[in-house]
Image (cartoon, rainbow, N blue to C red):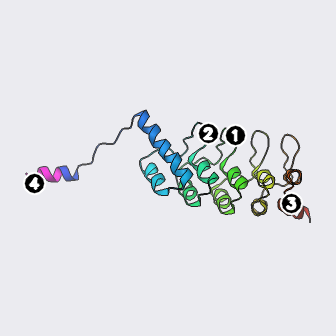
């Protein structure tokens, strides 16, 4: 009897196979966890072998949602996953770094750049994260992106630069940082 009990206790359980409906429910829970900054749930999702780069109907990934909602711990957790896609753009054309720039989070922008996000990447209209930070008058993010190598002379398809965007929006703080960056 003892060998049987020992065999049962040491046996490796068979892998759990999830059907498509269950996978969809898990993704929905994970997306809500990214919005809420629930790192415990996200960690369990990743431990279950679920994909880091899955996107919802709006094209948002877990990373984009965590960034947009300002959850630095959740961003860090997602960035630790293998093969996380820093270039993915949602249906609105925004990548994770664009979200950090738009929302004004230097710590999150820093984490993304350290993970390999391109500070000069452009969306379909040619806008960069620097332009989005300038648009929303996120002077601290503008300063950080410039220090990280963002090109202040980059222009979108309409010829707008970060400075012209800032000036057009009345974003005085961002415009001042951009003007100061032009001086030799």
Residue 3 forms part of the magenta stretch: yes
- The answer to which of 135 and 98 lies nearer the viewer is 135
Find disc 4 in the rendering and name its residue. Answer: 2
Mark 2–mark 4 Cα distance, whole angstroms, equals 54 Å
- Counting residues from the start of the chain, the first of labels 1 and 4 encountered is 4
Find disc 3 in the rendering and name its residue. Answer: 172
Q: Residue at x 62, y 53 (%)?
A: 67
Q: Residue at x 87, y 55 (%)?
A: 170
Looking at the rendered image, the quarter that the C terminus falls into is bottom right
Contact between marks 1 and 4 (CB within 8 A): the answer is no
Q: Is residue 173 above or below residue 83?
A: below
Left or right: 30, with 158 as reference point = left
Find disc 2 in the rendering and name its residue. Answer: 59
Mark 4–mark 3 Cα distance, whole angstroms, equals 77 Å
- Counting residues from the start of the chain, the first of labels 2 and 1 encountered is 2
- Counting residues from the start of the chain, the first of labels 4 and 3 encountered is 4
Image coordinates for residue 147, horizontal then vertical, percent: 77, 63
Secondary element under disc 1, as helix, strand or loop, is loop
Mark 2–mark 1 Cα distance, whole angstroms, equals 8 Å
Left or right: 154, with 23 as reference point = right
Label ID, residue 53: none
Label ID, residue 92: 1
Residue 52 forms part of the magenta stretch: no
> What's drawn in magenta, residue-wise?
1-7
Q: Residue at x 63, y 60 (%)?
A: 111
Contact between marks 2 and 1 (CB within 8 A): the answer is yes
Contact between marks 2 and 3 (CB within 8 A): the answer is no
Image coordinates for residue 88, horizontal then vertical, percent: 64, 43
């Amino acid at each position: 009897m003892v060998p049987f009990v020992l065999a049962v206790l040491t046996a490796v359980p068979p892998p759990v196979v999830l059907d498509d409906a269950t996978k969809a429910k898990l993704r929905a829970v994970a997306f809500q966890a990214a919005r809420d900054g629930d790192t415990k749930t996200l960690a369990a999702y990743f431990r279950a072998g679920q994909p880091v780069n899955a996107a919802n109907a709006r094209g948002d990934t877990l990373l984009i949602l965590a960034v947009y909602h300002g959850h630095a711990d959740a961003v860090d957790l997602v960035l630790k996953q293998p093969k996380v896609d820093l270039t993915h753009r949602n249906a609105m054309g925004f990548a994770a770094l664009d979200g950090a720039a738009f929302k004004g989070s230097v710590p999150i922008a820093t984490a993304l750049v350290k993970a390999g996000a391109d500070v000069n990447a452009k969306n379909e209209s040619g806008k960069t994260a620097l332009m989005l930070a300038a648009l929303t008058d996120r002077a601290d993010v503008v300063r950080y992106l410039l220090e990280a190598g963002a090109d202040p002379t980059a222009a979108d398809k309409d010829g707008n630069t970060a400075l012209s965007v800032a000036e057009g929006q009345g974003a005085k703080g961002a415009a001042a940082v951009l003007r100061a960056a032009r001086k030799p």
